[in-house]
């Protein structure tokens, strides 16, 4: 398994956000983690990303344990959230150069060019990121996240704030990222996009995963029906 | 984009071992310097504020030349402390507002390297502001501030201030009341640095024997070491939820 989570509990003071989540992802799988607001999707992803410590339970990613082996996990992890994690006063290539140094990527100039071509921003590489549209920033954010060629990608609501064109472009970038054999976990409210991209759908509700189905299992019903039934149950 | 995207096939793994501590620190400092060189957001805010404070003090106190020398250390450190708060707040807000702090925390580096990187760049910006404020102050107050001893005290005081300030700014930036909270947290904690800094600065300005100032300098050095060591140890816990 690329990701194994057992009986994960996360508490913030008296509030329990995750109540014993069990979750497994095989290498190369694209899992869409769906659920209503406040279900704990972002908290769950932040724990996988080693940005938040679990209160109880076990988390293993790419064979490394969290939080004990967090540095090894981070080297194999790419994270994209609705915030770009980019510096507005730096150009695209300066941002990527900075992250390349932080990830100790050898020969990073060639890799930066490769990534900028992948996200379609090669011609704007010397422009300040604050001059980019929201969609361009999100594409560059994906470029930043794949720069060190991670095995696992975590996407937290990557479509937030994007218009139709930008969302379609992001679809293509996400498909490319997934086609490169990476394991992907994405949270989203956009069921149509999730249905188009993911190979498995997990529903997180009230702090636990209430239902899970692969694309093949969903063929008879559609994702919306499955989602509604999972929340009702 | 399509052509490019379909042409990309990653065949080799690009990630390498965890970067060295110094390399990560340097990357953060260089990033901050580049961004600041372009925007001048931090330095200009701190500088304008500092100049306004010393000009206001100049008119408000309306002192005779002898008295001016007596209040110099207090006015200088008050100016540096308030301007420093502005800079620290802004420096961490830039990281937080666009999620960049998460970007730093996601890198496979020792988190203390993030602390040292931010602290060194904050110190550099504070020293730039001080380097401009000192000659302006000298002219306005007709006081010679360019004494090696005084400059050393300013350096030591700034190190301690930024050392603890960077840690507290990292904590306060994660709250809704970050602008107020940093000042409330920072000033009581940083007093052990500010008091010996003011006493030692006064001593150098008044031409007191070095032996009489050494105790304050020793205190400054000790607090610098303690604050930086504590920040080094607790930074990981401060940034993790």
Image (spheres, coloured by chain):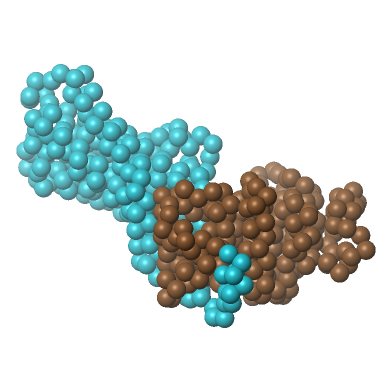
Chain colours: A brown, B cyan
Question: Number of marks in the image?
Answer: 0
Q: Quadrant of residue A66?
A: bottom right
Taking the view exactly as shown, the residue that stands out farthest to the bottom is B11
Q: Residue at x 88, y 50 (%)?
A: A228
Q: Residue at x 40, y 45 (%)?
A: B91
Q: Is residue A221 left or right of residue A24?
A: right
Residue B119 image offset from top left, x and y in percent: 35, 52
Residue extending farthest front: B3
Residue B113: horizontal and vertical position, in percent? 41, 61
Where residue B120 sits, quadrant-wise, is bottom left
Q: Nearer the viewer, residue A217 or A137?
A: A137
The residue that appears at 36% across and 37% down in the rendered structure is B86
- Tell whether B134 sits left or right of A192: left
What residue sits 64% from the left and 74% below the top? A180
* In the image, farthest residue toward the right: A220
Answer with the quarter of the image where residue B232 lies: bottom left
Percent x, y for residue A29?
73, 71
> Quarter holding the N terminus of chain A?
bottom right
Q: Tell me if residue B191 can be seen.
A: no
B22 vs A209, left or right, is left
Q: Position of residue A8 (x, y in %)?
A: 72, 59
Task: Examine the rendering and report whether any part of residue A123 can be seen.
Answer: yes
Along the line of sight, the residue nearer the viewer: A13 or A171: A171
Which of these two is toward me, B15 or A209? B15
Q: Is residue A151 above or below residue B163?
A: below
Q: Is residue A140 left or right of residue B48?
A: right
């Amino acid at each position: 398994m690329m990701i194994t989570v057992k009986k994960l509990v996360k508490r913030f003071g008296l509030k329990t956000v995750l109540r014993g989540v069990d979750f497994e992802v095989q290498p190369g799988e694209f899992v869409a983690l769906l659920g209503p607001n406040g279900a704990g999707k972002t908290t769950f992803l932040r724990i996988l990303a080693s940005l938040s410590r679990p209160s109880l339970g076990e988390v293993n990613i790419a064979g490394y344990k969290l939080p004990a082996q967090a540095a090894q996990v981070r080297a194999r992890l790419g994270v994209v959230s609705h915030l770009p994690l980019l510096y507005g006063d730096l150009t695209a290539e300066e941002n990527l150069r900075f992250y390349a140094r932080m990830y100790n990527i050898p020969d990073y100039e060639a890799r930066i060019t490769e990534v900028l071509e992948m996200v379609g921003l090669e011609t704007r590489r010397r422009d300040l990121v604050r001059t980019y549209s929201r969609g361009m920033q999100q594409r560059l954010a994906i470029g930043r996240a794949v720069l060190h060629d991670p095995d696992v990608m975590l996407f937290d609501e990557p479509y937030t704030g994007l218009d139709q064109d930008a969302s379609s472009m992001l679809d293509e970038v996400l498909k490319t990222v997934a086609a490169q054999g990476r394991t992907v976990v994405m949270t989203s409210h956009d069921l149509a996009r999730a249905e188009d991209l993911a190979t498995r759908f997990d529903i997180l509700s009230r702090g636990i995963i209430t239902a899970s189905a692969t694309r093949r299992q969903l063929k008879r019903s559609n994702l919306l029906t499955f989602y509604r039934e999972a929340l009702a149950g | 984009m399509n052509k490019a995207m379909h042409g990309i096939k990653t065949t080799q793994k690009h990630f390498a071992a965890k970067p060295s501590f110094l390399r990560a620190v340097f990357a953060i400092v260089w990033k901050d310097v580049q961004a600041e060189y372009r925007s001048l957001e931090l330095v200009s805010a701190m500088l304008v504020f500092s100049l306004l404070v010393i000009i206001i003090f100049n008119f408000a106190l309306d002192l005779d030349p002898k008295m001016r020398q007596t209040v110099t250390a207090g006015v200088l450190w008050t100016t540096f402390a308030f301007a420093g708060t502005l800079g620290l707040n802004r420096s961490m807000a830039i990281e937080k507002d666009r999620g960049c702090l998460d970007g730093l925390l996601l890198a496979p580096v020792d988190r203390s390297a993030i602390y040292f990187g931010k602290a060194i760049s904050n110190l550099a910006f504070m020293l730039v502001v001080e380097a401009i404020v000192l000659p302006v102050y000298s002219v306005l107050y007709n006081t010679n501030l360019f004494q090696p001893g005084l400059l050393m005290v300013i350096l030591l005081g700034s190190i301690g201030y930024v050392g603890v300030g960077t840690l507290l700014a990292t904590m306060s930036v994660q709250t809704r009341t970050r602008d107020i909270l940093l000042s409330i947290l920072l000033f009581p904690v940083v007093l052990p640095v500010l008091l010996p800094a003011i006493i030692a600065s006064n001593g150098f300005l008044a031409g007191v024997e070095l032996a009489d100032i050494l105790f304050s300098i020793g205190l400054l050095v000790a607090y610098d070491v303690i604050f930086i060591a504590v920040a080094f140890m607790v930074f990981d816990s401060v940034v993790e939820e």
